[in-house]
Amino acid sequence: MDSRHGDGARRRLLLLAAAAPLIAAGCATSREYLAAPAAADAPIVPLAGSRWRYQRINLYNDLPLDEVVCELESTSPSWSVIWRGQQERDTIRARYSEPWRIVEEPLYGELMRFERPVPVVPAVLAAGQRERVQTHYRVAASSRSLRWRTDLAALGWERVVVPAGAFTALRIERTSYFEPWQMSRFSARRVETLWMAPEIGHWVRRDWTGYYLDETTLGGGDGPLARASPEEREEAISWRLMAYEPAPVAR
């Protein structure tokens, strides 16, 4: 068989396998959601100096990894947030064009810089809000400008319990499809769920994991694939709010 035809068939098979989790997710049972809280009509806009402290959890074994403090450093000309880990070397800045549209953010381990701001939450905190943004991003490890697309959907209000307490928060699903900066990877996506609490102007929980295809997973076994799905999986991390400290009211 012509090797070009074989490569094309193999790539089509990989893409079908990558789509399988998304098809399954679409078949999931519906959830019961709550009425929107009063704070949704006038969500807090954090002031410079506000702090949110999170515990990072490894979702593979539910064990704590570390803690991160996010402090809103400034709100003009853009929103600058210092992320401080437990080690001094872990200090890094995230930047948003407004709350909360990402210009630069280190959530996934690399500081990612986007050519066009990417939303974390919808502009209006209401169930049913959807948004799609296509842009490019860069990381320090690569000189290339890489494709990125985020699809966002606000599903409904849920009661969420985290170490800082119980909150009625908007459940938001984000899926990002992107061109990996690592040369051996392709067809990558990151799947994220976060719960945005209008009473603190930030998320109280944010979970993510990622998937990608790698040529090294091909071949072997009894069939065209070495295993049921050729997808590799990244970390699976949960950020859970431990404390919120609003900025002092200006005098």
Image (cartoon, rainbow, N blue to C red):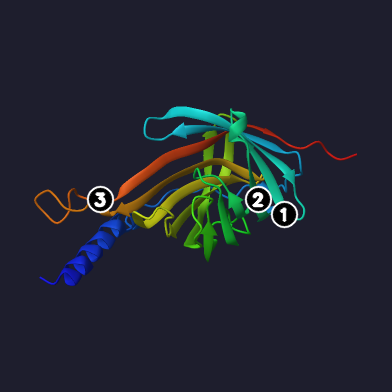
Give the residue pinned by disc 3: 216
Q: What element carries label 1?
A: loop
Q: Nearer the viewer, mark 3 or mark 1?
A: 3
Residues at discs 2 and 1 in contact (Cβ within 8 Å): yes
Q: Which of 146 and 237 is in front in this view?
A: 146
Residue 22 against residue 111 in the figure, above or below:
below
Name the spot of residue 48 as percent of width and height, x first.
Answer: 76, 43
Amino acid type indicated by mark 1: Ser
Is 184 placed left or right of 197 in the picture?
left
Residues at discs 3 and 1 in contact (Cβ within 8 Å): no
Work out which quarter of the rendered image holds the C terminus and state it. top right
Work out which quarter of the rendered image holds the N terminus and state it. bottom left
Is 183 placed left or right of 130 in the picture?
left
> Neighbour class for label 1 at 10 Å: few (<14), some, many (≥20)?
few
Q: Which of 34 and 99 is in front in this view?
A: 99
Query: Residue drawn at (70%, 51%), measured in percent from left and top?
Result: 79
> Neighbour class for label 2 at 10 Å: few (<14), some, many (≥20)?
many
Name the spot of residue 16 as percent of width and height, x first.
Answer: 26, 62
Amino acid type indicated by mark 2: Arg
Q: In which quarter of the image is residue 62?
A: top left
- Give the number of the disc on residue 78: 1
Q: Which of marks 2 and 3 is in front?
A: 3
Name the spot of residue 19 as percent of width and height, x first.
Answer: 31, 59
Query: CA gap, disc 2 to disc 3?
Result: 36 Å
Give the residue pinned by disc 2: 95
- Give the number of the disc on residue 4: none
Residue 117 appears in the picture as rendered: no
